[in-house]
Image (cartoon, rainbow, N blue to C red):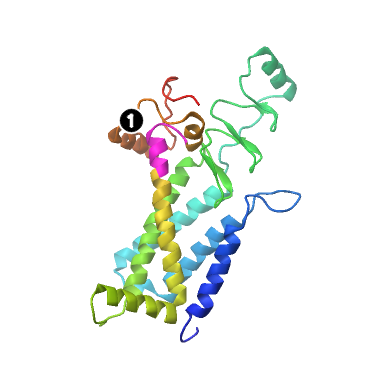
Amino acid sequence: MLPHHQWMTGLPVFLVALTVMARQHHRLKHPIRWPNPIYLGAYGGGLFSTLVCYTVHIKAHQHEPLLVSFTMWTLMFIHMFIFYRLVTGDPGIVRAEGPLQEVLRGVGEGIVKGYCSDCQLASPPLAHHCRLCVACHHQTDHHCLFLNTCIAANNHWYFVVFIMMNIFLMTGFLSGAYRARVMQGVQGDWVDQFTAHIVYLLNEDIWTALMVICNGASLIWAFYLLNGQFQVVGSQQTTLCRLKLGNPVSKPTLGEKVKNFWTFLLRGRVPLSSQAHYFNTV
């Protein structure tokens, strides 16, 4: 490691990486137009870098209680399993139920209400065609760029739990980094002490400083995502449903939202309202 002034190397590289990320598009600039995997790579790289920093670099287990370390490792294994499940699992792809000719005949006779011309199959209610995934999904919530997949009927529960796991793990990392890198015996008020800690990290431990910045910003974003899921699931909607139909006419109370969200966590499916007048039409 560089002995002093590590920020002179670390910060420019970090800013270049942020600039590259900011200039990316949802699709590759190639004739095949596949979804851009850089967002998934950025999340996976950040996760791996945080894990190595936590375990090997700052050795947080030497500065925190055994129960905290055990909890962090348990949550990490669960988190990795859910991450693998989200990236590789079936989000809820709509499969063809019969030959195309029969489907087209049903559309012409009015028997089939929904039809996707891209997938050339009957589209059930609440299904949506994703142009990035090039597939229709049951009960679509949204397409997640950082997982490179749609969040739909089969993985919506995993996604919400995944956000919760991220919040716990990022909070644990920030706590471990504070325990391991806080400077002892610094004189002055809290402003002087905080400034001394920041200067020390920038000069002597830029890796930890950058991981703290990334995890701190991601923690705020994770709370924002979780609140968004609480609002739509608590209102018996999905994100796409709210974008298409708007907010509920009769707004549910906070208690009703908590009940609906808790039902979702227990059953794994969004308790969608069956009332036709429940939503505003757009």
Single out the residue that lies furthest toward the top: 109
- For the residue pair 83 and 130, the one nearer the viewer reads as 130
Task: Answer above or below: position of 256 versus 166.
Answer: above
Residue in view at x 31 percent, y 70 percent: 64
x and y percentages locating residue 136 in the rendered image: 62, 34
For residue 216, side relative to residue 112 (left or right): left
- For the residue pair 121 and 82, the one nearer the viewer reads as 121
Q: Label 1, secondary structure: give it.
A: loop
Residue in view at x 58 percent, y 26 percent: 124
How dense is the environment of label 1, judged by Cα within 10 Å: few (below 14), some, or many (20 and up)? some
Q: Amino acid at mark 1?
A: Pro
* Res 264 visible: no
x and y percentages locating residue 21 in the rendered image: 58, 60
**Overall secondary structure of the magenta section:** helix
Single out the residue that lies furthest toward the right: 31
Whether the magenta-drawn stretch holds residue 235 is answered as: yes
Task: Answer above or below: position of 229 versus 206.
Answer: above
Find the magenta span and give its range: 228-238
Q: Which residue is mark 1?
A: 252
- For the residue pair 237 and 245, the one nearer the viewer reads as 245
Whether the magenta-drawn stretch holds residue 7 is answered as: no
For residue 195, side relative to residue 244 (left or right): left
x and y percentages locating residue 25 in the rendered image: 63, 52
Residue in view at x 68 percent, y 12 percent: 109
* Figure label count: 1
* Res 151 visible: yes
